[in-house]
Amino acid sequence: MVEVDSSDLSRDTLFGVEEMEINFGPQHPATHGVLRLKLKVDGERIVDCYPVIGYLHRGTEKLFELHPFFQNVPHTDRLDYVAAATNNLAYVGAVEKLLGIVVPPRASYIRTLLSELQRVSSHLLWLATHAIDIGAMTPFFYTFREREIILDLFEEYCGARLTLNCMRPGGQPYDLPVGWVERCAEFVGGFPEKIDEYEGLLTENRIWKKRTVGIGILSPEMALDYAVTGPMLRGSGIGLDVRKAMPYEMYDQMDFDVPVFYNCDTYDRYLVRMEEMRQSTRIVQQCLEELPEGPLMAKRPRVLKAPKEGDVYHAVEAPKGEIGFYIVGNGTPNPHRCRVRPPSFYNIQVLPEMVVGGLIADLIAVIGTTDVVLGEVDR
Amino acid sequence: MGDFFGETLYVYAVVPFIKIIAAIVVVLTIIAYTTFAERKILGFLQVRMGPNRVGPWGLLQPIADVAKLLGKEDVIPNRAVKWAYVLAPCLVVGPALLILSVIPFGPPSSKGVASSWFITDVNVGLLLVVAIASIGVYGLLLGGWASNNKFSMMGGLRAAAQMISYEVPQGFSLVVPLLMAGTLSLVGIVEAQLTQGRWFIFGFFPFGLLAFFIYFVAGVAESNRNPFDLPEAESELVAGFHTEYSGMRFALFFLGEYANMIVISAVAVTMFLGGWLRPFPSVEWLSFLDLAFLPAGLAGLLWFLIKLLAFLFVYIWFRGTFPRYRFDQLMDLGWKWLIPASVLAVVATSLWKVVLL
Amino acid sequence: MSWIKRFLDKILLLDLFAGLGITFRHLLKKKVTVQYPEERMEPAHRFRGMFRLDEERCIKCTLCARDCPIDIIYIDWHQEVNPETEKKEKLLDRFDIDIQRCMFCGLCEEACPTNPKSIWLTSKTYELASYERWQNLYVDKAELEDWRVRPAYTDEEIV
């Protein structure tokens, strides 16, 4: 909570000036979920902003403790419900680290492929909602047209479109269906033109630039202090990406760049995410070419029992930031404690810093650029 | 005495009355189908189909909308100021429809005013248009204030501020074709385009184009359309001056917005695009475009309608493409860019005219 | 000369016209709307839809009930001697699934040891809406067997 000295608001006018306290409530078309912001505004300038969360709390971490390891995978889908594959990957990677299971290479390639496709799909959704909050309606429909194709690919692979449940501790449950590789290659072949289309509509557009350049400044020191990760951090000049810093699955063998921009504002975060989409298609193309043959599931005991003493933390680069699972085992098939490190939770902390002193219209742009999904904030 | 009840009454009362009814009916139909066209065209721009369930290709959709709105409950908020609450929508629609009385839809006929394609021709027509358009601001202010809702009032104030600031460039840019024509009467302006042989948008290049562009942008801001639709945007906190309105009153506000769109387009067509004239009115070999086979000036009406519909398409096209300006940026644009540009256009045109003549 | 280009860009609004051009091109493209209910999107082969149960194949091992992450499968069975074959066999008393809570994760289908599986979700149906809460949403053994897979608006059946 940012304190502002309200004595500089007392001006001697004829009418007397006071602040208005507004609830930017849990139900609002622009807050992307049930985020509540208690705003104190002076006219249109925001004086104070206090986020209230917890409206979507479902007790996920307690649910994790009640079921064995492999049954928890569907629960992880629902944390960041827009990007389910990376949540699955983080959890499954943590369990494998704890139990010492090594995943066969074909399964590892498939996992990398799925999580990069998921990154593209999540960024498409982010672009759609961010643009429509700022007023441009059409990118929403164009991005959803592409997203449909990605969701169809996921549906053919694992049977569901949004809550995927597509990974298991030890490997993959299903193999790629016949023709999937061709369809995926066709999609990623035509995708960079679509990104060019969205950029043509928005990137050079003067109205878009006026709404996003210089808005929502997040200095690198503040970002590091608040443990912000993901595109928020990379738009402020710090090039920290879990895929490069602590590589997992097949990322150390993939050739891709991590985009970093230095102006710390909303426009740069937009550029970071657009470039990330392009890099993700590069990774997908490499995975499709290099896919080896082999088994899909590692040799593992039928009942996965955690070691008596042991804890592990495994982090993955989700589209929103770094998602991590800290699992403590106690010798039973159920985890003793499974704590989620959700990226959006830490990203929301900087929201008051970024919006105080700005207008309400800027608040909408900043919430959009934070790319917050309440499922993982509240768990 | 007999003459009064004969010709005078006919020419000055009966015929205009019929024309007014016809014009209002036609314009209201165009407004209703503009809402439908907007949804359809926005859909097509967004690779989806608009409404297509009600009637063939969805053509009966506006009727379904009107039926729905008429059936809604008539709510007046508890401590709202009743007379203002009821009057506000009328003050938005009324002036827009009033301007239609001076706009020429087609050529004047040689047999006098009664059989011409306009309701009346005042010799200060342009002044009347600008003056009546200013009344439209009252409706928004009154509606916002009368709702007894803090947010509505803020929305109404913002809408009113926006409309007032954009009236200045609108008026200034209309001076440019005025200088080119030399008369304030709207029929006179179109006839001047005929005698000068080209539409005023191409006159005194590039200042005709500049004036047209400024007029159009100011017109988009006047009717609160994207990219200047912050007062009525849904994803902003202040939900706008029409929050507390529902049912037919809300429909009337919307009608007013579309009527404003149509009237601004009609004025732009008259002033800059040659009203009822065909493109390149002085080029002989294009005279087949005059469509002389149609009786008594119907061709002129047809050209007017085509140009008007093109403008409406551009309005909808803008809505589907651009993001929205923030309110202070909007005011910036109006005061710091459009007004100097329109003043520049006026000064340059008058200098040009003085130098040429 | 790039400043001239930038100045012209700013004055002539070329970026706005580029945006207008992109949306105009889309006017002429093919639309992606699927006219439901005349056209229906067929789900993929592995799509996890509504359950089907085959009681003959089921060996009543209750692995599916044990594996369900939200414990919504309720199975009761008892052993009886079949008079015809003189062998003990298991009979299913109750096999209920609470579909209000089901998240269609497919773990029960994975757990089923018979081949072909006795419980499967690939029935390709996703139209599960009903007018009342208790209708169709707590399915017992008889309904699971007889589940007529059909969209609610037509009479045709999708097997």
Image: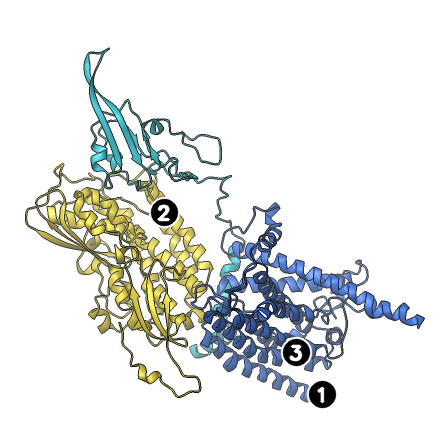
Q: Chain of mark 1?
A: B
Q: Which shade is chain C? A: cyan
User: Which residue carries the number 3 mark?
Assistant: B131
Residue at 26%, 70% in the rendered image: A237
Q: Which shade is chain B? A: blue
Residue at 76%, 61% in the rendered image: B299
Label 1 is placed on what type of residue?
Leu
Q: Quadrant of residue A34?
A: bottom left
Q: Chain of mark 2?
A: A
Q: Which residue of the protein is positioned furthest toward the front in this rendering?
A: B78
Label 2 is placed on what type of residue?
Leu
Q: Which shade is chain A? A: yellow
User: Which residue carries the number 1 mark?
Assistant: B357
Alpha-carbon span between mark 1 and mark 2: 69 Å
Q: Looking at the image, which is closer to me, B233 or C19? A: B233
User: Which residue carries the number 2 mark?
Assistant: A151
